[in-house]
Image (cartoon, grey):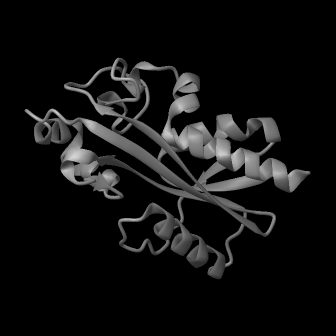
Amino acid sequence: MRLKVITSNSGKVNEYREALSSFSITADPVKIQYDEIQSSDPEEIVRKGMDHLKASGISDFIIDDSGMFVDSLNGFPGVYSAYVQETIGNAGILKLMENVSDRKAVFLCCIGCNISGKDIMVTGKCDGVILEKEAGAEGFGYDPIFSHDGKRSLAEMPLSEKNNISHRGNAVKLLVKEIEKMIR
């Protein structure tokens, strides 16, 4: 089976490919424009995106919405994480966090999957902290400044290790469980 991964982010596609390979599911990146509502709730964004795609006749797909929610920044950048990454990047987040002692943050990832005419929606999370400076060369986005244990950034981990603890990795595990239920 082939699932369309609706994203232009190759890092996401690689994570999905690795996680779904045991099901003989191929994850192919596809760029499809769809209306993405403005909301601070990733689940609402995914639900509306799925409805729009299905109404357009698109099936067998995965979409997701994720964000990094920083406690001391009142949840910023949240669902606007991609835009913030493009505009101020990791350096901008680190600048906002200068002299801030509460560095707690959480990554959330909501995945919507339409497979064989059925919808699945799951949300995974990864609690952690914003580091003082960037570290590591793996991963993408905020991985160099986010740490789940306060010691290593996600960018300092091999992809397989990161997938075991990351927000998307946790969401994909939940997705896999739901797909397993469908197959039985």
Residue 107 in the figure: left or right of residue 95: right
Residue 40 in the figure: left or right of residue 42: left
Marks counted in the figure total 0
* Residue located farthest toward the bottom when viewing the structure as drawn: 55
The image shows residue 149 at horizontal and vertical percentages of 39, 24
> Which image quarter: residue 112?
bottom right
Q: Vertical placement of 36 versus 128: above or below?
A: below
* Residue located farthest toward the left when viewing the structure as drawn: 99
Residue depicted at 31% across the width and 32% down the height? 129
The image shows residue 139 at horizontal and vertical percentages of 43, 30
* Residue located farthest toward the front when viewing the structure as drawn: 102
The image shows residue 22 at horizontal and vertical percentages of 79, 35
Residue depicted at 67% across the width and 37% down the height? 19
* Front-most of residues 109 and 12: 109
Residue depicted at 43% across the width and 71% down the height? 36
Residue depicted at 54% across the width and 65% down the height? 32
